[in-house]
Image (spheres, rainbow, N blue to C red):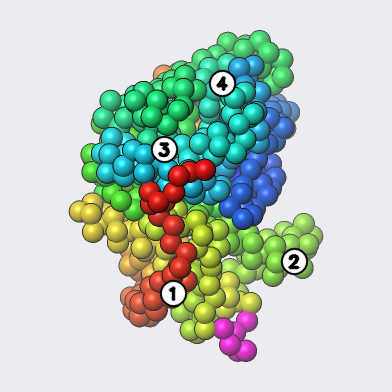
Amino acid sequence: MDYVLGVDIGSQGTKGVVLDENLDVVARLTMPFDIPPTWCGIAEGDAEEIWWGAFKAVWHNLSNSFAIPGKKIAGIGCSSFGPCLVPLSAEGRPTRAAMLYSDARARNEARYINKRLGIDRIRDMGRNGVNPYSIAAKLLWLKNHEPESFEKTALLLTGANYIVYKLTDMHVVDYSQGALLAPFYNYTRKAWHTGTCDALGVDVDLLPALRGAEEIAGYVTAKAAEETDLPAGTPVVVSCSDGMAELVSAGGGNNGTAILIYGNTGAIIVPAGAPPPIEDLVVTPHPVRRDQDLVVGVMETAGALTKWFTANFAVAERESECNTGVSAYQVLSAEAEGVPAGSEGLIVIPLFSGERTPMENAMARGLVAGLTLSHTRSHLYRALLEGIAYGFKDHLDLIEDCGISISRIIALGGGSQSDVWVQIVTDVTGRRQFVPTMPTGSDIGAAYLAAIGIGLTDDLEGITARIISDSREVMVNRHTSTVYKSQYEIYQYLHEVATQGTRDKAHPDSNGS
């Protein structure tokens, strides 16, 4: 029996999974590592040592721990965070550290692009706008501030496709990530726009070839085979970002089904036919279905906040995890469950690293309001979960206001295993959620892409049906939902207060220098 390998390079660790021909899990593991937090808008990662090293390490551990020989791997898929900028030399070596999805230093460059091309023109052509988080803005920042690195840059890639490049020497990216390279991407033609590249002084040859995420990008090279112990000639699919891979792990979604990802960042993905540009959200092609587009929202900090909280306010619990077998998150969740809905007046505005959608504001900062001497650690943790839930509600309401109906929500990501958090989000949004009991995740989605690419399956609808039938349904508590409705109005007011004077919509009022 042959297998497919799926690997996800994440912000808190690397996940790897091996599936058999029936798409059942044969082996799965996670290897933790930490990416340094964003500081003053700067967020970087080491693509060669950390990401490529993590890919090799997770495969070696899967192979050795579960006695899976490399020759049994018939296809490989990868995913990773995005949008990030990985600039490579002609020899394929990074010319600098990768600029991560949360890197927002390119504010002037975003303004310059919008002024040079016009915001309306950018959206008409590519469906999406340009902001400091955009790859295009990062690329111009590199050109303006590190010209030596820019001059050495011959290839531009993202996280997942850097691993594909290391495996195959192929310079490719999928359409769903291509759309994140606005304004270089022509959405209608699914091709790069050379006129835009010329206008911004960017050589179109820097940009990778565009393909479907499930298409074969290339095959493991002899050099990669020597480094990884994977057989030369093994097919590798183009792959996609972690959020898109997570979507695929749930069957790719369909109209009316929203995917809520409780990850390091919070993501909301809704299949929506062929939506128009939506100013405060992202529109992107489906990674697999060519006739389907997606509306996407991304909250800069979701699980990152719970991680920050445990690191600073649950030190003893983290130190005792190995001895007790109980994680700090479990302890805090149990405490939060004992706190009344609304955290007895405590409200957190979760803008601890700025925000991407639905209000792009790299300079926004978090806020804790209503704190009294009667509040405890448990109150603060629950208020943090509630604040993220209010952010999810902002997105879902905006999507429905655009005429896109949402009939059900599938909860994915590590945070979806927290019963109290999922219930909070259900009650805040007033929408029931389905929490899968069968394995899901970006590594599973990457493996599914490999399975599609080599012809093992093409039945995403069947996967969706299995997900729903095997899910735990979380219903709305009407009493709690009423409490949150009044609390949400206060949240909206405080959100406005927290962001006054920090708005940075990358308007065309700077020369980009």
Magenta span: 371-376
Q: Secondary structure at mark 2?
A: helix
- Which one is in front, 261 or 403? 403
Which kind of residue does numbered mark 2 sit on?
Val
Which kind of residue does numbered mark 3 sit on?
Leu
Residue at the image position 36 percent from the left and 39 percent from the top? 116
Residue 147's x, y, as percent? 60, 31
- The reply to whether callout 2 and callout 1 are in contact (CB within 8 Å) is no
Residue 419's x, y, as percent? 50, 64
Q: Mark 2: give few (<14), some (14-19) or many (20+) Cα within 10 Å.
A: few
Indicate which label's residue lies in the foreground, 4 or 2: 4
Residue at the image position 73 percent from the left and 62 percent from the top? 318
Q: Which residue is mark 3?
A: 180
Q: Which residue is mark 4?
A: 154
Question: Is residue 373 located in the magenta-colored stretch of the structure?
Answer: yes
Residue 509's x, y, as percent? 40, 51
What distance separates the C-alpha of mark 4 from that of mark 3? 20 Å
Indicate which label's residue lies in the foreground, 2 or 3: 3
Of the numbered discs in the image, which one, if any, rests on residue 315? 2
Is residue 499 among the parts visible in the rendering? yes
Indicate which label's residue lies in the foreground, 4 or 3: 4
Which kind of residue does numbered mark 1 sit on?
Val
Q: Earlier in the sequence, mark 4 or mark 2?
A: 4
Q: Mark 3: give few (<14), some (14-19) or many (20+) Cα within 10 Å.
A: many
Q: Earlier in the sequence, mark 4 or mark 1?
A: 4
Considering the whole magenta stretch, tell me its main secondary structure: loop
Q: Which residue is mark 1?
A: 497
